[in-house]
Amino acid sequence: MKPDVVRTVQEIRKHVQKQKLAGKSVALVPTMGGLHEGHLSLIKKAQEVADYVVVSIFVNPKQFNNPDDLNSYPSDEATDLKNIEKLGADVVFIPSVKEMYPDAFATDVKVSAGIDILCDAHRPGHFGGVATVVTKLFLQVGADFACFGEKDFQQLFIIKRLVADLNIPIKIVPAPTVREEDGLAMSSRNARLSKSDRQIAPQLQAAMQAVKTNLHKGISIEQACKHAWNSLEKDDHFKVEYLEVRCGEKMVLMDKPSEGCRLFAAAWLGGVRLIDNIEI
Ligand code: AMP
């Protein structure tokens, strides 16, 4: 069945309130569109945890620190709606930029944990934009659950902090990273990889797996990451931004691997920034 499509806060509230009055639980899946199997896995997860599923599509200008990245962000509403329809989500919320940020808009949400490191060190302001839009979506929709991918682990960490700190009555449900068969983590931005870069892109995940193997063999984090960094950059295809092992719970940098720690990576390939993380 075709999902309802609503574009205003008033309409989405009405839809959700009706479900809640009928005793149904509601899950939200926030996206920026360009939907792929990773997003669809979140919708499936949402259907497992709640009776009624809201998918939002909003390319949030506040979280882009590079205008070219914003302008070239893949967006195809008709295809996204077809994909959502196949899974049977209930309603799709597609607000305009004006609906989200009316002219007088003057509020920013800033989370002070999980910043200055990893992506935040390279994309200043990005997570402030994420925190602001996610807070708005949570308050607009009033869902009981919200599903987020571990692909964006730092984002997940910051959103969990935000929800706890502001006592927002919503449960954050994480979901594992969905990958292409060759190991590349799915991302809307992968569509912007050239044909030859698409062939090379899985080397990032392969290098990360090699770090994991080396750590399990007892090689130090420093040595294992240095080796992977050099091997990625040796042919001048990748430009690595970071390759770090951090504790998955507090995001603290580790000097020795231990239970629950993760390897985080970001690298540019052509004009596309790839990010990924795996459990060690
Ligand atoms: P985006 O549209 O890129 O803002 O992502 C929307 C949601 O989908 C976020 O919670 C992401 O973490 C999640 N997501 C993106 N890529 C993947 C993936 N490959 N596997 C699982 N979740 C993903």
Image (cartoon, rainbow, N blue to C red):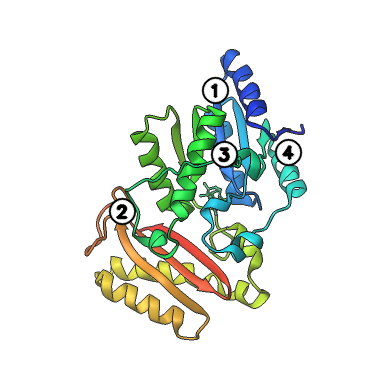
Q: Residue furthest front?
A: 104
Residue 57 shown left or right of residue 105 in the figure = right
Q: Which mark sits nearer the N-terminus, 3 or 2?
A: 3
Left or right: residue 13 versus residue 139 is right
Determine the image quadrant of residue 93.
top right
Front residue of this view, candidates 56 and 68: 68
Tag on residue 29?
3
Label 4 is placed on what type of residue?
Glu
Cβ–Cβ under 8 Å for marks 1 and 2: no
Q: Is mark 1 on a helix, strand or loop?
A: loop
Q: Is residue 42 above or below residue 202?
A: above
Circle 1: residue type: Ser
| Quadrant where the N terminus is found in the figure | top right
Residue 89 visible at all: no
For the residue pair 147 and 241, the one nearer the viewer reads as 241
Residue 144 screen position, x and y as percent: 49, 27
Q: Earlier in the sequence, mark 4 or mark 3?
A: 3
Whole-percent x, y for residue 245 in the image: 31, 62
Circle 1 is placed at which residue position? Answer: 25
User: Assess mark 3: CB under 8 A from ligand 1?
Assistant: yes
Give the label on residue 251, or none: 2
Structural distance between the alpha carbons of marks 3 and 1: 14 Å
Q: Image check: 193 left or right of 250?
A: right
Tell which circle, 4 or 1, labels the residue nearer the N-terminal end: 1
Q: What residue type is labelled 2?
A: Met
List x then y, in percent, for residue 279. Answer: 37, 56
Q: In which quarter of the image is the C terminus?
A: bottom left
Residue 85, disc: 4
